Amino acid sequence: MSVAWQQVKEYTDIIFEKYEGMAKITINRPEVRNAFRPQTVDELIEAFNLCRDDQEVGVIILTGQGELAFCSGGDQRVRGEGGYVGTDGVPRLNVLELQKIIKYIPKPVIAMVAGYAIGGGHVLHLLCDLSIAADNARFGQTGPRVGSFDAGWGATYLARVVGHKKAREIWYLCRQYDAQEALDMGLVNKVVPLAQLEEETIQWAQEILEKSPIALRFLKAAFNADTDGLAGIQALAGDATMLYYMTEEGKEGKNAFLEKRKPDFSKFPRLP
Ligand code: S0N
């Protein structure tokens, strides 16, 4: 099944489309196996932020253009002394901001992986809520070989997902793993033939869209709170506050203040 994706906004390095509750964000630099430069990361952050604010969007699919790569990490051609250098000449590690928004956007993000998910590109798929892989997908970290490393979520969250022994193997040896090996170690949710990748991913997205948005939001926040300490609890608590604002009990406090009267919380239950 293919769907009639509608372009949301034109970008240079990414394609941003929507269709019936789904957003699809595609890294569009196939000539470098979808490596990201600062502009790519800026565009990805903007698209994810638009998805966060867009109440029509319930699921986001992150993918790479073409069949050869999901993403090959930072564009080594623009790697400077203090990070990746954009048109402003300033070196930055702005992929960390992108990692945060993928992890904390209160909607499920699905990585749709064909070909290579390597280096910083592997970390992006790792941080997505779910990963659907084509049978040609290949996964791995390259940092210690190419002079970089992600000692943040790229290492620590990887260990939560595949276990410490496997995560250390992945980082210390810099090997590549095929789709079946990734499935066996719990790194991806499903492997399908390449020709069925988008159809399968859309099927998963549509099943998710049938579910309660607030339930999904709290579950994502809870999974993050388990791994992310106080930052994770902050997001979970923010969701609880949002929900409280929607209740009559929450509104009574605000209304009483605005009406210059004492709030009456006596009518609200003190449930066990
Ligand atoms: C992906 C690989 C395995 C594909 O191999 P294949 O199919 O044989 O193709 P190639 O001939 O190698 O590549 C085709 C063309 O694409 C270019 N290219 C590929 N990857 C990159 C890249 N990452 N940057 C720039 N160019 C790339 C090739 O050069 C080739 O071009 P032409 O045709 O002109 O020769 C293979 O390509 C591969 O291994 N790629 C490199 C993977 C890699 O090491 N990536 C970087 C890893 N590091 C990071 O991602 C940084 C992490 C990071 O961003 C970060 C993390 C934590 C905190 C901060 C940061 C931060 O730095 O911001």
Image (spheres, rainbow, N blue to C red):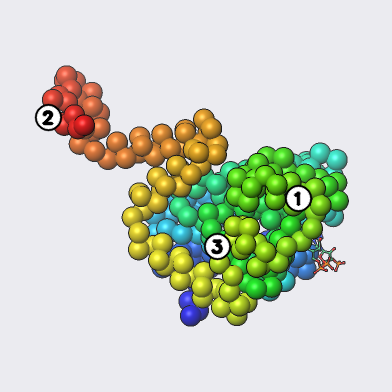
Q: Is residue 138 above or below residue 82?
A: below
| Secondary structure beneath label 2 | loop
Q: Badge 1 is on which residue?
A: 169
Cα distance between the residues tagged 3 and 2: 47 Å
Nearer to me, 60 or 148: 148
Q: Quadrant of the C terminus?
A: top left
Q: Amino acid at mark 3?
A: Asn
Q: Position of residue 152 (x, y in %)?
A: 68, 40
Q: Amino acid at mark 1?
A: Glu
Ligand 1 under 8 Å from disc 3 Cβ? no
Quarter holding ligand 1: bottom right
Mark sitting on residue 189: 3
Nearer to me, 170 or 234: 170
For label 1, the crowd category at 10 Å Cα-Cα, with few meaning under 14, some 14 to 19 and many 20 or more, is few
| Secondary structure beneath label 1 | helix
Cα distance between the residues tagged 1 and 3: 21 Å
| Label 1 vs label 3, nearer the camera | 1
Q: Badge 2 is on which residue?
A: 267
Please give the name of the residue rendered at 36% of the width and 50% of the height, measured from the top-left corner.
215
Sequence-wise, which precedes: disc 3 or disc 2?
3
